[in-house]
Amino acid sequence: MHRQTITTSTNQYDVFVGKDILGNLKDYLPKPYRNIMIITDSVVNELYTEKVVANLPNDAKVSVSVVPTGEASKSMENYYQLLTEAIDYQLDRKSLIIALGGGMIGDLAGFVAATYMRGIDFIQVPTTILAHDSSVGGKVAINHPEGKNLIGSFYPPQAVLYDIDTLNSLPAKEKRSGYAEVVKHGFISNFAYLEDIWKVDLTQEIDSHVLTDHLQKGISVKAKIVEQDEKESNIRKFLNFGHTLGHAIESELGYGQITHGEAVGIGMLFAIKVSEQRLNSTLPYDTLYNWLSKNHYPLNLPAISTKKLVERMKIDKKSENAIVQMVLLQEIGVPVTEDIPDYDLTNLLENFMRELDS
């Protein structure tokens, strides 16, 4: 069992990573709760909800709300429905919401918790590799058709309970999605971590010790940054490496057509190209491309308008004054932010997309 405490300006909470946490869930609750609402998706519900309910305190009233699996569920409609169900379940300010699932559920359930009665406790119980990133740091949100995570807040959980046994059931595309964020943490932290990640073959079963080590290191990278900059006014922006184009691709293709991590993989390739051209950096573009290709990340996209991608990048929450701000790398472990004028961005993106399709 690995325990890590995250201390920010607004909260302090523990992140537990280990085996069979679901079987001992009540032992990890930060305090007693009499009314608990579990929010999960249709796939995770079938796999783990029964076990979670069985391992919560016997004197607690427990209710379960289920949304369809997939990024499209991070919608205003589902958000409103969950608020209605919280009212029906008679949750009050001393109640608890459990986000049981991947990053989509963590974002959605966390935003419900942040806004219900001006904020009630919630805990993250992630069940995907991707959620090692999204469950830590207190970002909660829903999507708007014009952009990903445009409606949200900073609202830290009371705990993150990460049972790695749940990762055994992940389909291949979810493993790919999650490991893209592991790669991101490697790029913005240190070369040794990144080199170790290149050894992973996602088409095979990942050794549990290797996986746990990579997840713990990724959480540590994020925790160190979040503790210094909880609300993304400065260095927390570095965690968006690869996300500027990645989010635009997700939105333009339609949520759920490509996983978050698959889009971020392409976004990191683009960020490396931009880094090399604007900062004269020397970075392992070919190594990343080959690793993504070997692990079956989609690298040939449907025809997408460069103009529309640029427009989506400009309304991304990381942009300022309608100027796209990208996270680039001077070298591995040395991220910087850079404003990219429209004309330059369009040319860079057109060249990149043409090269990607060749």
Image (cartoon, rainbow, N blue to C red):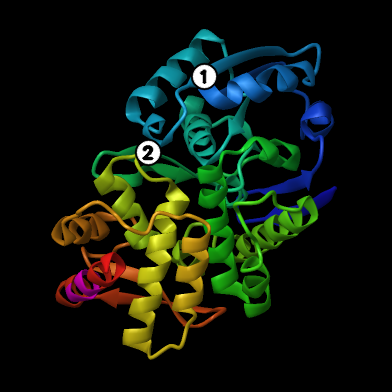
Q: Earlier in the sequence, mark 2 or mark 1?
A: 1
Q: Residue furthest bottom?
A: 280
Dominant SS type (magenta): helix
Q: Position of residue 207 (x, y in %)?
A: 76, 53
Q: Residue at x 47, y 83 (%)?
A: 283
Q: Secondary structure at mark 1?
A: strand
Q: Please tell me whether residue 348 belongs to the stretch shown in magenta.
A: yes
Per the model, the C-alpha gap separating discs 2 and 1 is 18 Å
From the image, tell me which residue sits under label 2.
256
Q: Please tell me whether residue 355 belongs to the stretch shown in magenta.
A: no
Q: Nearer the viewer, mark 2 or mark 1?
A: 2
Q: Residue at x 51, y 62 (%)?
A: 294
Q: Residue at x 46, y 88 (%)?
A: 282
Badge 1 amino acid: Val
Q: Nearer the viewer, residue 31 or 3?
A: 3
Q: Residues within 10 Å of mark 2 (few under 14, many from 20)?
A: some
Q: Position of residue 308 (x, y in %)?
A: 16, 55
Residue 230 falls in image quadrant? bottom right
Residue 67 relative to residue 319: left or right: right
Q: Is residue 244 above or below residue 343?
A: above
Q: Position of residue 326 (x, y in %)?
A: 35, 70
Q: Is residue 84 above or below residue 78?
A: above
Specify the segment rendered in magenta.
Answer: 347-351
From the image, tell me which residue sits under label 1.
66
